Amino acid sequence: QVQLVESGGGLVQAGGSLRLSCAASGLTFRSNAVGWFRQGPGKEREVVASISWSGTIKYYADFVKGRFTISRDDAQNTVLLQMNSLRPEDTAVYFCAARDAAGIATMTNEYDYWGQGTQVTVSS
């Protein structure tokens, strides 16, 4: 059974940083592209970043470029999202997702496995 577990969320002031971690069990991340999504109150789930199986190709949504960094640690079977210069509008539940494919993807229906999410709240 595949499980993705996010951690690292919390409450932070604007301008601060958080690092989210996505740990997988029942799945070897090495073979999968992984994405981070978020869903704010009353909003649809949207892609934040995606990383290919090799880690060489990365995608970032425009609203996080230059602030967030996605990376993978295959030895630990985890994918990280470093979030810097956080803004109140970054407040959302952040989800990790993996797909049974090597390449990056930006749509929710392109992913096969999802975590339960971790809350990120940025105060002004």
Image (spheres, helix red, strand yellow):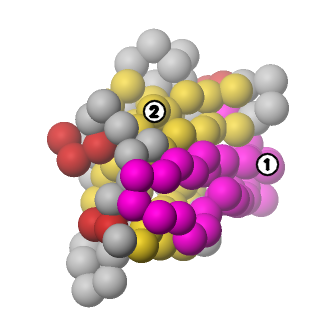
| Residue at which label 2 appears | 69
Residue 56 appears in the figure: yes
| Residue at which label 1 appears | 26
Say above or below: 73 vs 83.
above
2 or 1: mark nearer the eye: 2
Give the residue drawn at x 33%, y 59%: 87
Disc 2 residue type?
Thr
Over which residues does the magenta segment extend?
Answer: 1-29
Q: Disc 2 on helix, strand or loop?
A: strand
The one nearer the camera, 61 or 88, is: 88
Mark 2, Cα crowd under 10 Å, few <14 / some 14-19 / many 20+, is some
Say above or below: 109 vs 88.
above
Q: Are the residues at dot 2 and dot 1 in contact (C-beta closer than 8 Å)?
A: no
Q: Disc 1 on helix, strand or loop?
A: loop
Disc 1 residue type?
Gly
Where's the N terminus, which quadrant?
bottom right
In the displayed structure image, the side of residue 24 where residue 51 appears, left or right: left
Give the residue drawn at x 66%, y 57%: 8
- Residue 11 position in % (x across, y down): 56, 70
In the displayed structure image, the side of residue 100 where residue 7 appears, left or right: right
- The question of residue 65 being in magenta is answered with no
Give the alpha-carbon distance from disc 2 to disc 1, as whole Å. 25 Å
Give the residue drawn at x 60%, y 68%: 10
- Residue 19 position in % (x across, y down): 60, 46
Give the residue drawn at x 26%, y 86%: 42
Going from N to C along the chain, the mark reached first, 2 or 1, is: 1
- Residue 79 position in % (x across, y down): 62, 38
In the displayed structure image, the side of residue 104 where residue 76 appears, left or right: right
